[in-house]
Image (cartoon, rainbow, N blue to C red):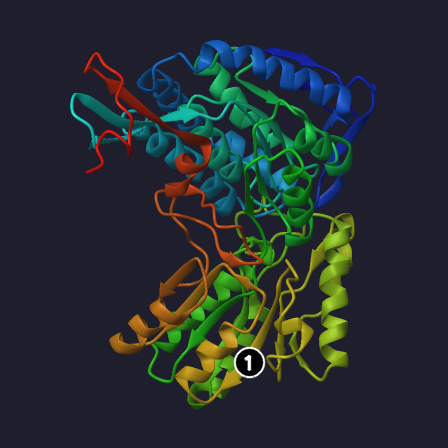
């Protein structure tokens, strides 16, 4: 079988890993379909990439921000033209259905056009000085070389969240794509290259987290790290970066709750729960992994939800009729299986699914049934720990206040949803839910690029993608221009 071999992008050249080794990228729906061979890089490759980025920074930072933005506009137009091709590539390497991979590419398109507008809005402030004949202002400056580490579940959208604001701000980048899904990052960067991005401004180093990610985090010439992934790995990233005083943006896990009150539009809540729980096969940090049901509607909702979950068509995402694709690899299957077993041992009831799918065409890939667990209590591990698979827990409650307490009782705080017709409770939930995102009468998934994306507690460290990304990828400089033609001493010469 023939398949393409890809190289690292370093200083505008495509170079194999110095080790000569590669990692095969397999279609999770059909392991006989090899998407390509990608470099198995190590510290030496990272060093070359950082050096190339550092060299390119000397000139890229001097390109006016509106001109940098024009590259993003052109890249967005190229992504529009290649949307179907890139979506199919993504389904082959990641597994999610075509409707979703088209959406993933569309998110990168939206991000390109949105961030391009920021090229004319990198605003600072002017402010009165406390001294006469003195002008005071602040300006945004690029950080320098930044390291970007991205996950496999949104292999084009999330790299675009990081690359585009970093570039428009004047930084140069070294990006390490996820080992399972590097091709989509390559496609994204190819669009930038074809849009006229100069050599060395973006560099790709492909490989494992330990061999490639750690040297990138620790490199002394890398001035900031933006990471999306698990909370466990994020903690490691933050600690290692702290040793060299690097700013770090961490976007990590979630255990997201959809609350359904007795007065909710039940059909709407069912639609939202099904999409939130099983979209992307539950492999989203914003996935609905807990559905909190007020007891008045719990039985009706549960019966309808279980029936709809059982009816979902699981298969190869390239089939337009498929609704739920595979999990990305065998490790994710084992995690889903393990957590179902833990839940049942703690007293939960299996209402749907619960097993890997291995018969027929399913034997070629890594598939898991859409799974619904009932009788779950807030203290069970299945109600508190992230699964990152098509596994959802149903938890019943009595009062609105109890629902808020249950939703907030976990270590994560990314996305939440409330279904109700009561505007007072809706606004109380917006105020009281401990999360970076709250939806009213909409599912826990569906963030838009121009709003801040991120969470609280073990979900993140306070930085945000989207609206907040420019803040992370720039640093403030205070500027004073004294035109008095004499020495003036702040806080001294203006004292009474």
Q: Kindly identify the residue that appears in the image at 69 percent across and 46 percent down.
A: 236
Secondary structure found at label 1: strand
Image quadrant holding the N terminus, namely top right
Residue 98: x and y, percent? 52, 44
Vertical position of residue 80 compared to residue 270: above or below: above
Vertical position of residue 222 compared to residue 253: above or below: above
Viewer-nearest residue: 276 or 142: 142
Image quadrant holding the C terminus, namely top left
Q: How many marks?
A: 1
* Mark 1, residue position: 395
Question: Residue 165's image quarter?
Answer: top left
Viewer-nearest residue: 186 or 47: 47
Question: Residue 494's image quarter?
Answer: top left
Asked whether, in this view, residue 391 is left or right of residue 294, the answer is: right
Q: Kindly identify the residue that appears in the image at 60 percent across and 20 percent down.
A: 203
Q: Is residue 6 visible from the viewing direction of this image?
A: no
Q: Kindly identify the residue that appears in the image at 47 percent across and 60 percent down.
A: 415
Viewer-nearest residue: 135 or 116: 135
Furthest residue in direction front, as rendered: 496
Residue 344: x and y, percent? 73, 79
Question: Residue 26's image quarter?
Answer: top right
Asked whether, in this view, residue 102 is left or right of residue 65, the answer is: right
Asked whether, in this view, residue 354 is left or right of residue 156, the answer is: right
């Amino acid at each position: 079988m023939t398949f393409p071999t890809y190289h690292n992008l370093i200083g505008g050249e495509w170079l194999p890993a110095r080790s000569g080794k590669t990692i095969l990228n397999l279609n999770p729906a059909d392991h006989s379909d090899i998407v390509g061979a990608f470099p198995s890089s190590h510290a030496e490759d990272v060093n070359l990439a950082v050096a190339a980025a550092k060299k390119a920074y000397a000139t890229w930072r001097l390109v006016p921000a509106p001109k940098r933005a024009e590259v993003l506009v052109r890249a967005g137009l190229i992504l529009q033209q290649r949307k179907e091709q890139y979506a199919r590539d993504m389904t082959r390497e990641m597994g999610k259905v075509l409707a979703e991979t088209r959406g993933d590419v569309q998110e990168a398109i939206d991000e390109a056009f949105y961030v391009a507008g920021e090229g004319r809005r990198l605003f600072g402030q002017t402010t009165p000085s406390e001294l006469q004949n003195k002008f005071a202002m602040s300006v945004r400056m690029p950080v320098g070389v930044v390291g970007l580490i991205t996950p496999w579940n949104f292999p084009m959208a999330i790299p675009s969240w990081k690359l585009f604001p970093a570039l428009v701000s004047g930084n140069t980048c070294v990006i390490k794509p996820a080992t399972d899904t590097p091709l989509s990052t390559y496609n994204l960067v190819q669009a930038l290259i074809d849009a006229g991005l100069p050599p060395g401004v973006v560099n790709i180093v492909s490989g494992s987290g330990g061999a490639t990610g750690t040297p990138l985090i620790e490199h002394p010439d890398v001035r900031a790290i933006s990471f999306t992934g698990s909370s466990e790995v994020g903690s490691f990233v933050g600690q290692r970066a702290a040793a060299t005083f690097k700013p770090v943006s961490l976007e990590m896990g979630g255990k997201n709750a959809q609350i359904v009150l007795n007065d909710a539009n039940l059909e709407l809540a069912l639609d939202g729960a099904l999409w939130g729980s099983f979209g992307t096969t539950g492999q989203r940090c914003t996935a609905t992994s807990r559905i909190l049901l007020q007891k008045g509607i719990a039985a009706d909702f549960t019966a309808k939800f279980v029936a709809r979950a059982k009816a979902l068509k699981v298969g190869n995402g390239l089939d337009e009729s498929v609704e739920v694709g595979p999990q990305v690899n065998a490790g994710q299957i084992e995690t889903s299986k393990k957590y179902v077993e833990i839940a049942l041992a703690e007293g939960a009831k299996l209402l749907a699914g619960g097993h890997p799918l291995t018969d027929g065409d399913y034997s070629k890939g890594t598939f898991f049934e859409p799974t619904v667990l009932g009788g779950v209590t807030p203290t069970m591990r299945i109600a508190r720990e992230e699964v990152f698979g098509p596994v959802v827990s149903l938890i019943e409650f009595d009062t609105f206040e109890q629902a808020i307490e249950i939703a907030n009782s976990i270590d994560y705080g990314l996305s939440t949803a409330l279904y109700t017709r009561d505007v007072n409770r809706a606004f109380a939930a917006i105020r009281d839910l401990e999360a970076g995102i709250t939806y009213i009468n909409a599912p826990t998934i569906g963030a838009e690029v121009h709003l801040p994306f991120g969470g609280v507690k073990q979900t993140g460290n306070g930085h945000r993608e989207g609206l907040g990304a420019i803040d992370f990828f720039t640093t403030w400089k205070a500027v004073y221009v004294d035109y008095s033609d004499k020495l003036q001493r702040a806080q001294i010469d203006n004292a009474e």
